Amino acid sequence: MRSPYNSHLHFKTIFSFRSSLMASSFTQTLKPDLPQDLDDRLCSDPQNQQQQECSSFTKSNDSTLLLASPSGYLCGESRIERAWAHWRKLGRPKLIVAPMVDNSELPFRLLCRKYGAEAAYTPMLHSRIFTENEKYRNMEFTTCQEDRPLFVQFCANDPDVLLEAARRVEPYCDYVDLNLGCPQRIARRGNYGAFLMDNLPLVKAIVEKLASNLQVPVSCKIRIFSNLQDTINYARMLEDAGCSLLAVHGRTRDEKDGKKFRANWSAISAVKNAVRVPVLANGNIRHMEDVYNCLQETGVEGVLSAETLLENPALFAGFRTAEWIKGHEENTRDGNLDQADLLVDYLKFCEKYPVPWRMIRSHVHKLLGDWFKIHPHIREDFNAQSKLTFEFLYNMVERLRELQVKIPLYIKDSHASAIASNA
C-alpha cells in the first residue's frame, strides 16, 4: 500500500495544485474532474494569490518525551500527564471556534482569531474521501503559520482509513479530532458522527488506533446521552482509549435545534468531574457573559461557539449583536464595528487564502442577513450572481453604506476582562 506520507499537505504542493486548478477554471474548456458549479471554484486569481509556507510540526525544545512520543507508548498517569503538558504548551486556550461544515475554513478561522478566538477547529473532513481524493484534500484543508492552535476534525468509521488521513495532517495541527457529535441524516447514512454512539466498541477501536500511532494528541467531540451515567461511562471509555481532550456538546443526538433545546451544562460539568483530561464545553455560547457563566458553572478548560460566530465573528472580542443587549441597553454602547466591517476583513483573508465561492456566499448571507432584510433588492442582486467576484462584493458593501444602513455591534461591560485575567 502506498505510504500515507507521500502526500503530506506542504503548502508548496497545495498552492501549486490550486494555481493549476484556478488557471484551468478560467479557460473555456473545463477538465472533467474540476467543479462544474461556479460556487465550487476557488475565489482568487492565481496571479494575486499569496503563497505562504505552512509551519511544519516540530517538537518544542522544552518538550519532554511525553510530548514527542505517540501516546500508545504511554498509559495511566503518563498519558494524563502528557495530555495536560500538551494543553499547557498551547497556552490553555479558552475561546475556541467550533467545527462547522463549509464555514470554519481558514479565512473564517483567521477572522475569528483576529477578534479574540484563541484556537479553532477545521470543518469536519470525511476521512475516506480525504485519503482517496487529492483535490478534496487540497481544497478542503488549508492552514498557515497564524492558524494555531488547530484541531483538524475527521468523521470516520474505519480505524485504518482514519489513521491514514490523520497522518497526512498531523504535522500541521495540534490535535486530530474525531467527530462523534454530528446528528444529521447524512451522518446516519454514512454511519459516523453521533451515530457511532450505537457502536462504542468501534469508537474505542478508532481512538486506540489513533492514540497508539500518532505523535499529535487525539481529541474527541461528543454529544451527551439522555442518561447521565451513560454519558460519564462514554467519556471515561474515550479517556481510557487514549483521548487527550474531550469537547462535550451538551445536547443529545436528537436535540438538533440549538434555539429550541438548551445545552445541558450540568452534564458537561459531570463529565469534567469524571475524567482527568482537559474538557471543553459546547452549547449556549452567544456572548462573553455566556462564556464566563459556562466556565464558572462547568469548570471546563474552554468553550466552543459555532452558530453565533457565523453572525458575529467578533464575539470573543466582547462584541454582541442587538439581539443580546435587550434589557441591558443602559450598560451597552456602540462598539464602532459592524458586520459589514467583518465581511470586508473576511474577504481580504479570502483573497490571501482562496476558498470555494460557496463558502463565501454562505458567510455573506450570515453576516449581512439583517442588512438584506432592510434592503432586499441588494440581496436579490447578490443572489442573481451566478459567478461572484471580489469587486462585486466590495461594491455591494459600499452600496449598503451609501444607503446609510447602520446595524452596529455592541460592547457591554461584562466579565470578559475577568476571563482574560484568569487565563
Image: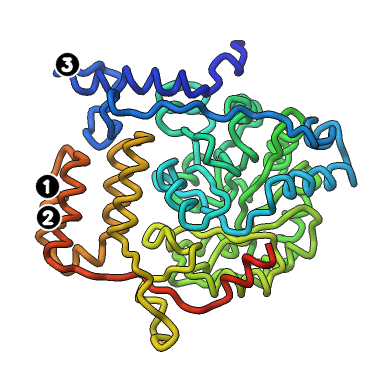
Q: Nearer the viewer, residue 126 or 423?
A: 423
- The picture places residue 182, in percent across and down from the top left corner, at 52, 50
Please state the horizontal and vertical placement of residue 257, each as a whole percent of the image: 44, 65
Q: Position of residue 272 (x, y in %)?
A: 74, 62
Q: Which residue corresponds to mark 3?
A: 29
Identify the element where label 2 is drawn: helix
Label 3: how many Cα within 10 Å (few below 14, some 14–19, many 20+): few
Q: Which comes before the other along the chain, label 1 or label 3?
A: 3
Q: Camera-side residue: 334 or 234? A: 334
- What amino acid does circle 1 point to? Ala
Residue placed at 81% from the left, 55% from the top?
A: 276
Task: Identify which amino acid the numbered label 2 is placed on.
Answer: Glu
Residue bearing the label numbered 1: 384
> Which dot marks residue 161?
none
Residue hosting label 2: 380
Quick one: label 2 or label 3, which is nearer the N terminus?
3
Residue extending furthest right?
A: 77
Above or below, 351 against 320 in this view is above
Does residue 323 lie above or below 130 as drawn? below
Q: Is residue 239 left or right of residue 180?
A: right
Q: Which class describes the residues within 10 Å of circle 2: few (<14), some (14-19), or many (20+)?
A: few
